[in-house]
Image (spheres, coloured by chain):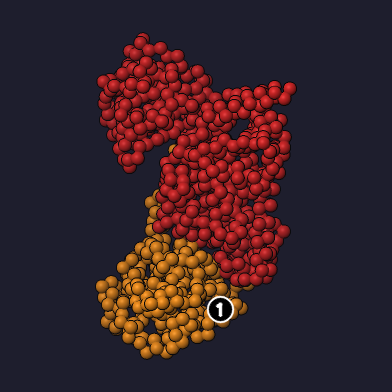
Chain colours: A orange, B red
């Protein structure tokens, strides 16, 4: 019954995406198909978890196990799934509002825990599904449906946040660059620990239909001699001026993952002994 | 006497709580029945503390009305507990020599003792054991066991303190009239554990291997217990950043097929409300133990109340089927938790175990043999069902085959969005109506398979009492005191959602008069019941009050007698 579906076609479902024509998320979805196919991820051993938002519809379009959950709660659910079933590839996806506003607290703790999942944010600098309100990534001063007189708040660079929170792998991609995004996704999925990939995925409806065209020429790779294990060096690529968009791995410093720690805890708790029977547990109450 | 209640009060370091634990442990080993409670001042560490131990040769269901033997290491600390510790008029009271008792206790049997010393609590225990008929040898070995891991010098000091206590007892025995002395026959040893420990052990027994939680009083002991034992069982305990993440991780873990649980108290359950709806619509098993405390908001974290009832029954927006099971004592905390897993796994539905501080944090004796309970597992999708797989297939029971990740051919997307039988998002009325019906249908199966309620007292009651959770214990004691002739019967549902409404209505219809007893200012239980059953007009009353102090057998007894006498008077008038 099982076969090795190593082509992009095998990962497609018959659901038609709800996204607007020209949305960056189509390109992200393509990159997901390619990354899974290239890595030969078994669909039944892959789980894609999302929150709520335009981009969080993605799991429905990929022929793996999927979980379209609650607004902001993608990371706790992905964490539970990975800890309970370590053999699975667990990929968390969602938007910038989902991950950084309502779900911001979980981002901090997933990063520092170094839970073994890949997390892709599709960053469009806006709330798309609710039709155009400011997000934590919307630049200061921008007019949106909820900031009629200009955004009074400064924006977050998700990569800066991830690096400072202890994520062990941090990268930035541009959705329009499918080849580059695919390669970064593959590295994220195979990374040991928490891998965070911020994908600039333009919203053509609420940020302007020229976004793809405008952003593409701004893309440039990280410097060839960039030391990706150096957090301070990585920080020179965050909060970039609007005329620059650096893509690639900004930071990578593998360390023991949450699963490693959990396995270590089990060994220290029980050693190589057989799991305790009920009598052994109840003796504490005798 | 076949029962006695001891209390110890002191400052941090006096060992009042340890004294209670040692006596409780020794008596449990003798086969006696014990309930032990603790209370603390607001300080994080080093404040005043008290322990109350009720010891009985017959089964007991609540803390006693008053204290028979009181040890006060310092009267200034006693003042903090004056409202909680009811001291019997004939109580025997021991205090430190030179520490002047408060004037309101003038005339009581107060005996100053030179406890002084590092192990004064052990001295006190030995003295009480000797004077009041507690098992001496078992008490001595409980002291040894308590300090077994300490240096020999510490063990020796405590045993010396123990012998000093025996000497005090011998000396004072001539001066003091011991009217109450425990008499009992030794029987098979009991286990002694708290409600929280029983819940955690129930989870392990049921096969729970994933726990995520956030520390919150008074449920934290469950997190701590499972932090010790789940790793040994090759499972996982995760302390999360908040309760949203705790229930989220539980749902994520359960989605992969691992039995999973979280534990919390009111404020945490409030945060979990949205996730409860996710588990319900996505039909993912999840067990939530909610240990109630005084509310709303931060309320009274260390005290009991039954005011999370309506929240547990109805929390989360939308039409959200869930199951709520109550427990009324430590042993039931075990069974309710196993039942919760059984129902949750079998019917793919979130289940809340509703307990409260007074059950969760008291230590109580139980028969080790009682900790057995049948375990049921989730039905996963079979090969035939995977051929054309519909995760949310509309079935007569409402339960659909669940494919677990790693199952080839079972791929589907689960969803907090309304979805069709394949899990695909759908915004149509027809699908929504069909899926609501499918999800709610599961409650019918649960009600039929798990008719969980208790019925005791008179079979043809003149006065029928309906109560739930921690009020059941004191009510049982109150009825025992009044006696069988009074014609009082009790109906206590353990399954609160779905409510066993039919047997409850039958019970109500057979009673002349109905009383509802609960620890909630706004009478949440009464309001809930009225949605399902009809009460006799003008012959239904509610005895309720705020939490912060558990209902006592004495106050329930008073209320029952008031109603009984009123009825007798009414009958006379009618005649």
Label 1 crowding class (10 Å Cα cut-off): few <14, some 14-19, many 20+?
A: few
Quadrant of the rendered structure where residue B5 is?
top left
Quadrant of the rendered structure where residue A219 is?
bottom left
Q: In the picture provided, is B152 more to the left or to the right than A26?
A: left
Q: Residue A268: x and y, percent?
A: 38, 51
Q: Mark 1 points at which residue?
A: A18
Q: Is residue B208 visible?
A: no
The subunit carrying tag 1 is A
Up the image or down, A230 lies above or below B36; here it is below
Of residues A178 and B460, the one nearer the viewer is: B460
Of residues A178 and B568, the one nearer the viewer is: B568
Quadrant of the rendered structure where residue B459 is?
top right
Q: Find the residue positioned furthest to the right.
A: B575
Q: Residue at x 49, y 56 (%)?
A: B272
Of residues B326 and B261, the one nearer the viewer is: B326
Q: Find the residue positioned furthest to the top.
A: B174
Q: Residue B198: x and y, percent?
A: 50, 41
Q: Which residue is drawn at 28% across and 79% down?
A: A226
Q: Which residue is drawn at 39% across and 88% down?
A: A214
How many numbered badges does the structure rendering display? 1
In the rendered image, the quadrant that contains the N terminus of chain A is bottom right
- For label 1, the SS is loop
Q: Which residue is drawn at 33% across and 66% down?
A: A165
Q: Is residue B86 visible?
A: yes
Of residues B75 and B13, the one nearer the viewer is: B75
Q: Residue A222: x and y, percent?
A: 31, 82
Q: Residue B398: x and y, percent?
A: 68, 59
């Amino acid at each position: 019954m099982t076969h090795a579906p190593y082509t992009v076609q095998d990962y497609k479902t018959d659901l038609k995406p709800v996204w607007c024509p020209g949305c960056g998320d189509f390109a992200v979805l393509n990159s997901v198909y390619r990354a899974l196919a290239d890595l030969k991820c078994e669909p039944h051993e892959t789980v894609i978890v999302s929150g709520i938002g335009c981009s969080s519809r993605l799991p429905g379009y990929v022929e793996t196990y999927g979980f379209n959950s609650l607004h902001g709660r993608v990371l706790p659910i992905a964490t539970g799934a990975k800890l309970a079933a370590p053999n699975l590839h667990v990929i968390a996806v969602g938007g910038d509002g989902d991950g950084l506003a309502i779900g911001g607290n979980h981002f901090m703790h997933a990063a520092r825990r170094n839970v073994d999942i890949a997390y892709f944010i599709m960053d469009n600098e806006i709330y798309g599904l609710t039709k155009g309100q400011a997000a934590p990534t919307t630049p200061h001063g921008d007019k949106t449906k909820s900031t009629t007189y200009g955004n009074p708040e400064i924006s977050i660079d998700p990569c800066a946040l991830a690096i400072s929170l202890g994520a062990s792998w941090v990268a930035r991609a541009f959705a329009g660059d499918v080849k580059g995004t695919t390669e970064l996704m593959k590295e994220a999925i195979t990374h040991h620990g928490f891998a965070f990939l911020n994908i600039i995925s333009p919203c053509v409806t609420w940020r302007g239909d020229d976004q793809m065209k405008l952003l593409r020429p701004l893309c440039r790779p990280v410097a060839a001699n960039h030391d990706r294990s150096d957090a301070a060096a990585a920080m020179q690529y965050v909060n970039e001026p609007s005329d620059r968009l650096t893509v690639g791995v900004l930071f990578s410093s593998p360390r023991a993952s949450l699963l490693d720690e959990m396995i270590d805890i089990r060994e220290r708790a029980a050693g190589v002994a057989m799991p305790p029977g009920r009598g052994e547990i109840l003796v504490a109450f005798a | 006497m076949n029962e006695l209640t001891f209390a110890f009060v002191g400052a941090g370091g006096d060992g009042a709580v340890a004294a209670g634990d040692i006596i409780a442990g020794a008596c449990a080993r003798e086969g006696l029945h014990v309930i032990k409670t603790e209370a603390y001042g607001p300080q994080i560490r080093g404040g005043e503390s008290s322990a109350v131990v009720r010891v009985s040769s017959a089964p007991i269901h609540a803390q006693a009305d008053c204290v028979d033997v009181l040890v006060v290491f310092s009267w200034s600390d006693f003042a903090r507990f004056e409202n909680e510790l009811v001291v019997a008029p004939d109580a025997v009271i021991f205090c430190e020599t030179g520490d002047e008792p408060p004037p309101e206790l003038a005339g009581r049997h107060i005996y100053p003792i030179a406890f002084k010393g590092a192990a004064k609590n052990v001295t006190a225990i030995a003295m009480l054991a000797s004077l009041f008929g507690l098992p001496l040898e078992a008490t001595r070995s409980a002291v040894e066991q308590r300090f077994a891991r300490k240096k020999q010098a510490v063990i020796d000091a405590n045993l010396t303190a123990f012998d000093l206590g025996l000497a005090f007892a011998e000396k004072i025995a001539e001066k003091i009239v011991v009217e109450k002395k425990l008499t009992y026959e030794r029987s098979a040893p009991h286990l002694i554990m708290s409600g929280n420990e029983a819940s955690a052990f129930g989870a392990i027994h049921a096969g729970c291997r994933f726990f995520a939680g956030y520390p919150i009083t008074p449920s934290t002991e469950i997190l701590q217990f499972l932090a010790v034992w789940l790793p040994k069982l090759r499972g996982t305990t995760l302390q999360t950043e908040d309760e949203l993440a705790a229930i989220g991780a539980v749902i994520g873990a359960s989605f992969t097929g691992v039995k999973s649980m979280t534990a919390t108290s009111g404020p945490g359950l409030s945060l979990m409300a949205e996730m409860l709806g996710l588990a319900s619509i996505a039909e993912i098993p999840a067990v939530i133990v909610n240990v109630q405390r005084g509310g709303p908001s931060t309320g009274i974290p260390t005290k009991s109340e039954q005011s999370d009832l309506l929240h547990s029954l109805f929390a989360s927006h939308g039409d959200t089927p869930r199951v709520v099971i109550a427990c009324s004592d430590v042993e039931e905390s075990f069974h309710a938790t196993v039942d919760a897993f059984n129902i949750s796994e079998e019917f793919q539905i979130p289940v809340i175990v509703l307990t409260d501080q007074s059950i969760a944090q008291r230590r109580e004796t139980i028969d080790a043999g009682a900790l057995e309970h049948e375990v049921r597992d989730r039905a996963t999708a079979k090969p035939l069902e995977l051929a054309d797989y519909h995760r949310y297939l509309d079935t007569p029971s409402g339960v659909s085959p669940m494919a677990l990740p790693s199952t080839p051919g079972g791929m589907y997307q689960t969803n907090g969005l309304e979805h069709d039988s394949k899990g695909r998002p759908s915004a149509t009325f027809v699908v929504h109506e069909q899926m609501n019906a499918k999800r709610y249908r599961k409650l019918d199966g649960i009600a039929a398979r798990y008719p969980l309620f208790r019925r005791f007292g008179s079979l043809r009651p003149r006065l029928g009492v309906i109560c739930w959770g921690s009020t059941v214990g004191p009510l049982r004691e109150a009825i025992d005191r009044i006696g069988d002739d009074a014609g009082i019967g009790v109906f206590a549902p353990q399954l609160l959602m779905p409510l066993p409404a039919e047997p409850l209505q039958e019970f109500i219809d057979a009673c002349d008069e109905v009383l509802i007893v609960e620890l909630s200012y706004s009478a949440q239980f009464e309001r809930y019941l009225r949605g399902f059953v009809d009460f006799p007009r003008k012959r239904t009353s509610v005895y309720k009050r705020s939490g912060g102090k558990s209902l006592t057998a004495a106050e329930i007894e008073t209320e029952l007698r008031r109603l009984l006498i009123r009825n007798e008077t009414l009958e006379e008038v009618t005649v």
